[in-house]
Amino acid sequence: MSANQTVDPEEIAELIARCKLSVSVSEFHGSLVGYLSAGGRFPHGSVLSALEFEPDPAPNADEQAMLTRLRHQTEEWLADPELTFSPWLPDDDAPVPERAEGLTDWVQGFLGGFGLGGSVEVNRGMSDDAKEVLQDMAGIATTEFEFDADDDVNDESLTELEEFVRAGAMLLHAELSRASRPANDTLH
């Protein structure tokens, strides 16, 4: 694998299965994005350790390298002025209940990762917009979706929530990750 090769959700799904992690791909990605958005550091380089996942068996050297690439790729996408970042959710053509579950998993992962990655001092200095985004995400994470008989209405509503979550994650990342990143935790 090339050092610049993009990591995709299928590779993470294989890692999750092999390492027996009890998490979905959406929740895993949300955890990483939340951790990065809160300014989380990787003092020992291990993504799984930072996110407090306990693999059994541990990832091999190639999988560790893939996780490091995913970390850097995600950070780049979150900071991209072209707004290329997108949460890893079920495809748009997946059934609406599956998409809703994926969104809930992603947001739950995001909030957990955000809590692990953030410091109290940084979080105290959050703007009102950032605080509101976190409150709204907490609401999404605990929502039990009820679906309308009209799939178009369901699809449109879910698409709006997905866009809110995407924009909210980018806002939190832009506001908080730079404020708490130490000079010695550079991206390569």
Image (cartoon, grey):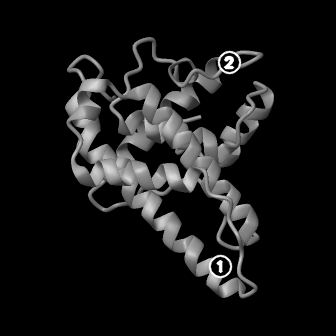
- Cα–Cα gap, marks 2 and 1: 36 Å
Please give the count of numbered marks on the rendered protein.
Answer: 2
As drawn, the label of residue 54 is 2
Split into 4 quadrants, where in the image is the N terminus? top right
Left or right side of 14 for 122: left
Q: Is residue 91 above or below residue 47?
A: below
| Residue at (51% x, 42% y) in the render | 110
**Residue 49 image-quadrant placement:** top right
The foreground one among 185 and 116 is 116
Left or right side of 55 for 176: left
Q: Is residue 184 above or below residue 160?
A: above
Q: Position of residue 90 (x, y in %)?
A: 67, 60
Q: Is residue 153 above or below residue 161?
A: below
Find disc 1 in the rendering and name its residue: 154
Q: Dot 1, crowdedness within 10 Å: few (<14), some or many (≥20)?
A: some
Q: Give, as a three-letter code, the residue at label 2.
A: Glu
User: Is label 2 in a helix, a strand or a loop?
Assistant: loop
Q: Is residue 76 above or below residue 92?
A: above
Q: Position of residue 85 (x, y in %)?
A: 42, 55
Left or right side of 137 for 10: right
| Residue at (24% x, 51% y) in the render | 128
Left or right side of 162 for 147: right
